[in-house]
Amino acid sequence: MARFCITGGKRLCGQTQAGAAKNAALPILAACMLATQPVRVRLPDLSDVRNMLKILRLLGCGVSVQGDWADIDAQSACCWRMPADLSGKMRSSIFMLGPILARFGKAEFTYPGGCEIGLRPIDLHLSGLRALGVTVRETGGRILCAGSLHGARVHLDYPSVGATENLLMAAVLAQGETVIDNAAMEPEIEDLAAFLQMLGAKIQGAGTARVTIQGVETLGGGSYEPMPDRIVAGTLLAAAAITGGDVLVRDARAQDMAAVLSKFEQMGCTVEIGQGVRLIAPRRLQAFRTLDTRPYPGFPTDMQAQLLTLACVAEGAGAVTENVFENRFGYTAELSGMGADIQIHGRTAFVRGVAHLTGARVYARDLRAGAALTLAGLCARGETIVEGVSFIDRGYAALETTLAALGACIRRETD
């Protein structure tokens, strides 16, 4: 068990980097199963990434890691059964379904695990694969899929990122043309498509609501560096905002973060775009009136907790509505214990800013909640202990080291 020990009140200043995006790297690692030649990928040092590499090894792939780069050779892959223990730990294990089916024509897996932030059913993944010719049956708690993939027209009832990416990976080796309508438009989908195109896939429209894939017989290899992590970048900018700081995230891409940067500006921050994104915070933040999470290009649900935490110490009152996951306000009880004024009514949190938060012992129950509680500790009076750091490690590489380099008084303790 690990925890962060934070003494608040330090103004964060300086430069830093977000690094490769977790939400881009994980589907790209899954897509390596499709390659007939070695692939080299730059990766963030995250527990979810390490677990995905373990899954690839257990499926028979050759995997070696040197520094930030992993070399993956899937030519020797021979297993189509997902390891239950690892897939149960991480939601992103579902990304392996499409590539395994495309590679072997069959797949066996358990329901994926991950953070407890609400229902995240995989019915869109399965219904889309059925349209591509896959039969699905459940037995003994495991799901068995089999079939020869062929092109089809697939309409997603909801623009699910995971379902879009899974269908994209399955369709690149399917016979004929596949069209995905109402596809998710997140930048990470464009990044996955760019990786697959590097391998030889034929894809048009990634990043729009309609994606067209022409199946090919084989894919090759190559070297690829995923996009910067827009959620990590947003969290680091939020750390500057909540401490009245001045931070430049050198590799942040403003075009991926428009909805988040707009909220920072509404709160009185100055945002400068050049060699990355720089945020200069006022002495006290101003409350935004409303924040609604939406699929991209709307406000990302993965930044909801961080911005709500900023609102806790902003001047004025505002409302945050969570439209993506139904159980993502659990962390607000911890913030209330630090002195925040938050009222929850259904999917909306009403926040009235207070002059300051007070340090306390709090527990992170999911990844982004952990980041939000860390932000709260950075500005709180006294010491804050954030338990459950293993959740934070799923999406932030040594977050305490990054924040300390910017001036935060934070350390990690491990039992």
Image (cartoon, rainbow, N blue to C red):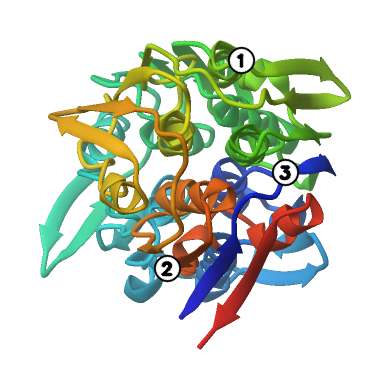
State the image quarter where residue 393 is shown.
Answer: bottom right
Residue at 75%, 52% in the rendered image: 41
Which of the two labelled residues, at mark 1 and mark 3, occupies the earlier sequence position?
3
Which percent across, then down, holds residue 201? 64, 30
Which percent across, then down, holds residue 168? 48, 31
Query: Which is closer to the viewer, label 3 or label 2?
Result: 3
Above or below: residue 45 compared with residue 155: below
User: Which residue is identified by label 3?
Assistant: 11
User: Which residue is identified by label 2?
Assistant: 388
Query: What type is the residue that disc 3 sits on?
Result: Arg
Cα separation between marks 3 and 2: 25 Å
Residue at 62%, 47% in the rendered image: 25
Q: Residues within 10 Å of mark 3 (few under 14, many from 20)?
A: many
Cα separation between marks 2 and 1: 32 Å
Query: What type is the residue that disc 1 sits on?
Result: Gly
Above or below: residue 2 compared with residue 141: below
